[in-house]
Image: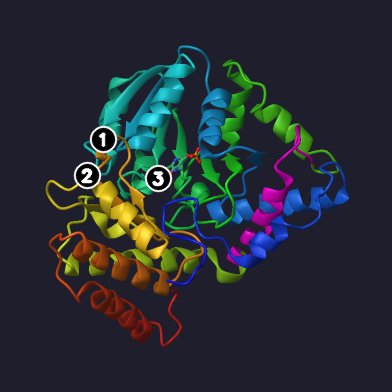
Amino acid sequence: MIDRPETLLTPGPVPVSPEVLLAQGSPMLYHRGPVFSELLADVADGIRMLLKTSAPVVIHSCSGTGGMESAVANSFSPGDKVLVVSIGNFGERFAKICRAYGLDVEVLEYPWGEEARAEDVGRKLSEIPQCKGVLVTHSETSTGVVNDIESIASVVRETEALLIVDTVSGAGACPFEMDAWGVDVAVTGSQKAMAASPGAAFLAVSERALQAHERARLPRFYFDWTQALEAYNRPNHECPWTPATSVLMGVRVALQKIREEGVDRMVARHALLGKATRAGLQAMGLEIFASSPERANVVTCVRASEGVDSSKIVSHVRKRFGLVIAGGQGKLKGKVFRIGHLGWVDRFDILRALAAVETAFVDLGLPVKEGTGVQAALEVFQAADREHGGDPPA
Ligand code: PMP
């Protein structure tokens, strides 16, 4: 094999375009001055475009989990009742953060691989008087399942609870309409569909969430929205503390590329890549883990063969082909592997991944229908070519 950098087909971090990498390598900027101020304004506008909102945007220099923590710390007071809807590892993380902050947490928990149902959320909410917030994952990266946030929002909107959505891996890959659906806080990150480096988290915050923030008494300092928005609203937009300037230089270019592609087309690209990945794996005789994978635009979670430790498949694909796929997380460790189709990724990355997985199965003596996966995925792409008159999204 030729010596080239590993290719990430993980659900974050993701491959990043050379333009973004070059921007990150530009000379250092001072974070209190006109050039960085313009960059911050551009980034905030780009996040609004991505999340389909006109809400103010808070920018933190941290990974997505910091963004989740910021949402909790800024929205509630000690002892507040909240409902966490959990369908996997990142739902569990939301519950852990809420407990760490001393909230009174109810969890509506589903078996991993299933999606949440709006009617269950509605029923649960009717059992929790004075519920102050519902926290839910959009794209559950540990299982590939994508929740129907629009329907969940419609039931939460009938109550006084804030709706806080972790769309760290969902935004830009799955449909998401913050304002039209009535989401109060949307959290996303730089290292997923946006296709920039890890290190920045973004929160769009509705008017209702800002009012709740005024009353919220949980302790906070670094992530305080009041400080963040006060600094942003100065004539020269600023962050209160020294931000990850190089990461944000890359984010600005990544968002510019999204503007050129168009958010809807970007979502359609991820949908097509997900569809082709599933078709290829199923043709190879493999089983997709999620119960209803049609919306799985971010990552495809695949069951390993019975009795096989999935990490062997992951490490074989990496060692032999320099292609990085992900293993299982939490209770799925060793049971599944995950192929990310997220970020700066196109159809040829998927065809490579399918060819690599098939070869790994053959090398490891595992059952697989040879010669079928790449073909099935190609057929999905060719059908898209016909449907889109030669201008498909991926
Ligand atoms: N939520 C989801 C759904 C995620 O996929 C991730 C990243 N894997 C996160 C939150 C945040 O994780 P991190 O702090 O590693 O960016």
The percent position of residue 27, horizontal first and vertical second, equals 81, 55
Mark 1 or mark 3, which is nearer the start of the sequence? 3
Label for residue 335?
2
Indicate yes or no: mark 3 CB to ligand 1 under 8 Å: yes
Task: Decide: is 305 above or below 218.
Answer: below
Give the amino acid at mark 2: Lys
Compare residues 343 and 171 and report the one nearer the observer.
343
Contact (Cβ within 8 Å) of mark 2 with mark 1 = yes
**In the structure shown, which secondary structural element does the residue marked by tag 3 occupy?**
loop
Q: Nearer the viewer, mark 2 or mark 3?
A: 2
The percent position of residue 200, horizontal first and vertical second, equals 61, 43
Task: Decide: is 68 above or below 315.
Answer: above
Q: Which residues are magenta?
A: 238-258
The residue carrying mark 1 is 331
The residue carrying mark 3 is 138
Residue 300 visible somewhere in the drawing: no
Contact (Cβ within 8 Å) of mark 2 with mark 3 = no
Density class for disc 2 (Cα within 10 Å; few <14, some 14-19, many ≥20) is many
Q: CA distance from mark 2 to mark 3?
A: 23 Å
Residue shown at the point (78%, 35%) measured from the top left: 231
Quadrant of the rendering where the N terminus is positioned: bottom left
Density class for disc 1 (Cα within 10 Å; few <14, some 14-19, many ≥20) is few
